[in-house]
Image: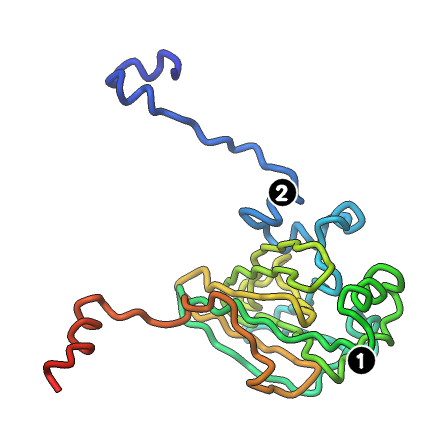
Amino acid sequence: MMDDQWKGLRESAREHLTQRDYQPAPLAERLSTCGVEVAELLAADRSALAAHWIPGVEIFPRRVHPQPQRGFFGELARQAEGPLAEIGLWPTQWATATMWPCSAKGFHIHPPYIPTGVGPEAWFRRLYRDEPRAFALRPYDREQWDIMFFLQGSAEMVLVDERAGLKRNILRFRLEGDNHRGPNNAGVVIPPGVAHALRAESSEDVVMVYGTSTCFDPAAEGRIESGLEAAQLPPEWATYLADSSRL
């Protein structure tokens, strides 16, 4: 029962009243549930999130420089310095993608390469637990890693680790394009075996640039629960189109 400030309501209504808790949950909890701003992730102590992180995922800040009276200039990445240089990853293909307002993409996933004679669990354990800094072991040329940058709009990204033997962690966060210059400008590295989805969050297009470690191959583009991408017809239209008596 709520207190006396609600005494002007019917008893039946007061019995169903609840109040929202506006106190933020711990970052690790929000990261896998309601999501966080990417700026909060960039400022967080990553060691404190180690148990909740997806191995191989990198999120790094981007520099967007204002150019008064003209616009802005946004850097993506530098081959010889920064996080991509550290992990030894540089794309072999660059591409762009545009998402219209209120649209969504995914989940998409790319198959990880598993060496002959090694089980997936043992391979991932070596890459991400036993020798996590041995970046030269990663077969970038045999599997598709994605590096995503956002130039325009606001987007929500959801990542799910589906690799055998690794904990099924979920990362959910929001990013912004260069036209929203600020702490939510970031680049994201997504390993193969990690399902990824995107939602456009505002009334403007989301424009992305992304690099891949291998060239685009439709056979390596797996989909999981991606029906949201399809524009569903009204039931009446579907019935009309399926009416064989009209043939």
Residue 246 sits in which quadrant?
Answer: bottom left
Residue 52's place in the image compared with 147, above or below, is above
Residue denoted by label 1:
116
**Residue 125 location (% of width, % of height):** 82, 62
Residue 87 x, y percent position in the rendering: 82, 72
Q: Position of residue 205 (x, y in %)?
A: 44, 71
Return the mark for residue 29: 2
Q: Quarter of the image for the C terminus: give it.
A: bottom left
The foreground one among 154 and 198 is: 198
Front one among 49 and 160: 160
Residue 143 position by quadrant: bottom right
- Give the amino acid at mark 1: Thr
Considering only vertical position in the picture, is 90 above or below 171?
below
Residue 31 can be seen in this image: yes
Residue 164: x, y in percent? 70, 63
Q: Residue visible at 64% across and 66% down?
A: 194
Left or right: residue 112 versus residue 136 is: left
Label 1: few (<14), some or many (≥20) within 10 Å? few
Amino acid type at image mark 2 = Glu
Residue found 80% across the figure and 49% down from its top: 47
